[in-house]
C-alpha cells in the first residue's frame, strides 16, 4: 500500500472526530484531504526540518515535539503547562501527519504556553498551530542575558539568541506573548486586529495544505496582484516618499536599513566586523576579511560572531525575528515595524543612523 493509500485509509477509519472543521475542508473527501496534506511542508519528508537528525537516528526531546508526530503526540500527553519540550528522544522518520492535529489529547489544549511564559488560545482550533509556530525564545531572554551589562561594551557572557523558525503565532500575537525584544517604556502592538473572518491561523490557511488564497484577500484589498502588494496604512512609515508600495516592501526596506546599521555598529563600537547569513547557523559570523560578503569558510560555526554588546544583541535578535517569519508582513505588520524602527533608534544612540522620515506605528 502506498503512503497516500495508507493515510487515506487512516482518515476514513479514524474513530476520533476532527477537533475542528473549517469552511475550507467541509465536504472534502478523504482522498482530497490527504492530497492537500501531501502538498504541504508538514508532509515534506525530504526537508531539513525532518532530516536534520538522520545521523543520530533520534530526535532530542527539545526538538521532537515540532519535528515528528510521535514527539507531538507525546507532548499532548503532558500537562501542557510548559512550552513544547518532552523529556525523551523519539526515532527519526516521521513528519507532521493527521495524528498530530487530530489527536484526542488536543481536547485539553485550550491555550499554548509561549517561551515568554504567556499563554494564549484560539476558539477555532488554531491553538494547535501555535504549539510549534511560536519560536524558541522571547525578548525577555535577551533582557535577562544583558541585565547589568554596559550597553556598548563587548561581553564574553553574551552569545546570539535565536528565535528559531516560522514563529508566525508569536508575530500574530505581538506584545501579548513578547516574542520580539521590546524596548522599555515603549508601547507595542498586541494581537493583529484583522477582520474577524481572517484573524486566526485556520481562518487564513487551509488546514491541510496550509495554503492561503489571494482571492480571499482582494475583496478588501482590491487590485492587489500578490500578497506582498497589500498595503494596510496610508502613512509613509519608512519616509521614502512611496505610499503605494506593499507593507511587505516597507518592512523589507527597514530590515535592510537595520542590517546596515548593525554592520556599522559592529565595525565602530564592537570593533569586529559582522556578517549575516540567513541559511547558516548561527547566522551571525565574523567578517574576517572585512569585505562585506560571506566566504564559505566564514559562514561556519567556529567563525560565529562572539563580540556582542547588549545593544548589538538586541538589534540582531529583532533582525532575526523579522527574518524568520517570512509571512510576518501579513501576520502583524505594525509589530514588526515597531521592532525594526525601535532597533534603528536604539543603535542611533551609539552610531550614525538615518532616522529621517520614520513614522512609528
Image: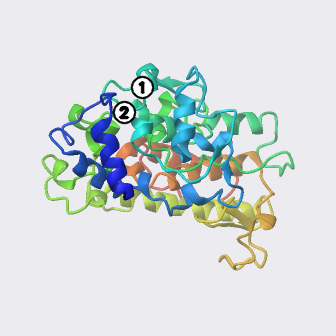
Which residue is tagged 2? Answer: 126
Closer to us: mark 2 or mark 1?
1
Query: Marks 2 and 1, how far apart in space?
Result: 15 Å
Q: Residue at x 77, y 79 (%)?
A: 289
Quadrant assignment, res 157: top right
User: Relative to the observer, which residue lies in front, 34 or 79?
Assistant: 34
Image coords of residue 113 (percent x, y): 54, 27
Q: Secondary structure at mark 1?
A: helix
Q: Residue at x 79, y 75 (%)?
A: 288
Quadrant assignment, res 90: top right
Q: Secondary structure at mark 2?
A: loop
Residue 330 visible, this orientation:
yes
Q: Residue at x 67, y 50 (%)?
A: 58
User: Relative to the observer, which residue lies in front, 20 or 124?
Assistant: 20
Q: Quadrant of the C terminus?
A: top left
User: Relative to the observer, which residue lies in front, 255 or 28?
Assistant: 28
Q: Quadrant of the N terminus?
A: bottom left
Q: Residue at x 22, y 53 (%)?
A: 213
Question: Is 328 on the left-hand or right-hand side of 260?
Answer: left
Quadrant assignment, res 262: bottom right
Which residue is tagged 1? Answer: 104
Is residue 332 positioned above or below 352 on the image? above
| Residue extending furthest toward the front | 1
Question: Is 207 on the left-hand or right-hand side of 317?
Answer: left
Image coords of residue 9 (percent x, y): 31, 45
Image coords of residue 199 (percent x, y): 29, 35
Amino acid at each position: 500500500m502506498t503512503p497516500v493509500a495508507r493515510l487515506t485509509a487512516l482518515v476514513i477509519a479514524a474513530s476520533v472526530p476532527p477537533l475542528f472543521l473549517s469552511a475550507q475542508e467541509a465536504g472534502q473527501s478523504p482522498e482530497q484531504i490527504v492530497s492537500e496534506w501531501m502538498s504541504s511542508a508538514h508532509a515534506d519528508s525530504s526537508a531539513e526540518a525532518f532530516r536534520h537528525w538522520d545521523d543520530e537516528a533520534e530526535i532530542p526531546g527539545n526538538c521532537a515535539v515540532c519535528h515528528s508526530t510521535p514527539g507531538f503526540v507525546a507532548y499532548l500527553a503532558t500537562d501542557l503547562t510548559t512550552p513544547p519540550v518532552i523529556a525523551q528522544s523519539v526515532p527519526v522518520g516521521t513528519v507532521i501527519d493527521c495524528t498530530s492535529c487530530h489527536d484526542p489529547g488536543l481536547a485539553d489544549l485550550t491555550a499554548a504556553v509561549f517561551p515568554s511564559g504567556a499563554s494564549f488560545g484560539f476558539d477555532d482550533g488554531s491553538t494547535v498551530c501555535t504549539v510549534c509556530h511560536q519560536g524558541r525564545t522571547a525578548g525577555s531572554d535577551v533582557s535577562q542575558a544583558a541585565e547589568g551589562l554596559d550597553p556598548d561594551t563587548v561581553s564574553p557572557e553574551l552569545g546570539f539568541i535565536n528565535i528559531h523558525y516560522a514563529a508566525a503565532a508569536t508575530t500574530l500575537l505581538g506584545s501579548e506573548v513578547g516574542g520580539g525584544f521590546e524596548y522599555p517604556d515603549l508601547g507595542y502592538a498586541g494581537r493583529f486586529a484583522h477582520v474577524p473572518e481572517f484573524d486566526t491561523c485556520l481562518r487564513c490557511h487551509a488546514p491541510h495544505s496550509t495554503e492561503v488564497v489571494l482571492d480571499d484577500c482582494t475583496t478588501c484589498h482590491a487590485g492587489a496582484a500578490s500578497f506582498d502588494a497589500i498595503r494596510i496604512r496610508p502613512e509613509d512609515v519608512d519616509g521614502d516618499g512611496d505610499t503605494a508600495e506593499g507593507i511587505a516592501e516597507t518592512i523589507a526596506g527597514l530590515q535592510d536599513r537595520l542590517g546596515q546599521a548593525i554592520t556599522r555598529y559592529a565595525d565602530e563600537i564592537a570593533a569586529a566586523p559582522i556578517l549575516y547569513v540567513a541559511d547558516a547557523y548561527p547566522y551571525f559570523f565574523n567578517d574576517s576579511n572585512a569585505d562585506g560578503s560571506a566566504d564559505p569558510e566564514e559562514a561556519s560555526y567556529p567563525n560565529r560572531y562572539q563580540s556582542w554588546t547588549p545593544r548589538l544583541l538586541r538589534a540582531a535578535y529583532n533582525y532575526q525575528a523579522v527574518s524568520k517569519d517570512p509571512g510576518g508582513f501579513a501576520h502583524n505588520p505594525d509589530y514588526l515595524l515597531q521592532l525594526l524602527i525601535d532597533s534603528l533608534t536604539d543603535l542611533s544612540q551609539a552610531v550614525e543612523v538615518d532616522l529621517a522620515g520614520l513614522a512609528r506605528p
